[in-house]
Image (cartoon, rainbow, N blue to C red):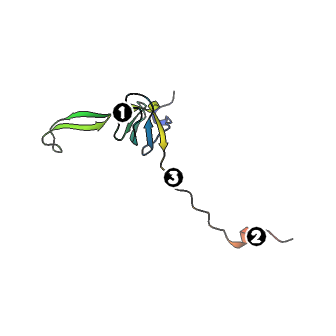
Amino acid sequence: MISASRKKTHVKKGDQVQVISGNHRGHSGRVLQVLVKKDQVLVEGVRMIKKHARKSQDRPQGGIIDREGPIHISNVKIVEAPKAEEPKAKKASSPRASKKPAK
């Protein structure tokens, strides 16, 4: 069995994805986090849930906050992946190395 840290997924953090099945079908957004062990992803603005926050220094009054809930990774497809920078052209080597020896 493949360990969770070595699992390969078709989406990565930052990819633009669309939900293809389930209650949130048709919604799209950017992947915020991939939960590899659970085969789930967090998509920006999709499956918003209410979470009750306890009083803390960050939130002195506590309250209810909106967060994205996880979606199973099989229910999303990539719409547009962020483009990787193309490798730069190689620098021409010294003129001696590029010339063929004359016969």
Q: Residue 73: horizontal and vertical position, in percent? A: 44, 32
Mark 1 vs mark 3, CA separation in Å = 26 Å
Which amino acid type is marked by label 2?
Answer: Lys
At 38% from the left edge and 40% from the top edge, which residue is drawn?
33
Q: Which of 75 and 41 is in front in this view?
A: 75
Q: Which residue lies furthest to the right in this view?
A: 103
Which amino acid type is marked by label 3?
Answer: Ala
Give me the disc on residue 70: 1
Q: Residue 91: horizontal and vertical position, in percent? A: 62, 67
Horizontal arrangement in the rendering, residue 52 relative to residue 29 (left or right): left
Q: Residue 94: horizontal and vertical position, in percent? A: 68, 71
The kind of secondary structure element at disc 2 is loop
Q: Which of 61 and 36 is in front in this view?
A: 61
Which amino acid type is marked by label 1?
Answer: Pro
Q: Which residue lies furthest to the left in this view?
A: 61
The kind of secondary structure element at disc 1 is strand
Q: Quadrant of the C terminus?
A: bottom right
- Dot placed on the residue nearer the N-terminal end, 2 or 3: 3
For label 1, count other residues whose C-alpha is less than 10 Å away and answer few (under 14), some (14-19) or many (20+). Answer: some
- Dot placed on the residue nearer the N-terminal end, 2 or 1: 1
**Mark 3 highlights which residue?**
84
At 44% from the left edge and 40% from the top edge, which residue is drawn?
17
- Of tags 2 and 1, which is closer to the observer? 1
Mark 2 vs mark 3, CA separation in Å = 34 Å
Q: Which of 74 and 25 is in front in this view?
A: 25
Q: Residue 14: horizontal and vertical position, in percent? A: 42, 46
**Mark 2 highlights which residue?**
99
Please, is residue 94 above or below residue 83 in the view? below
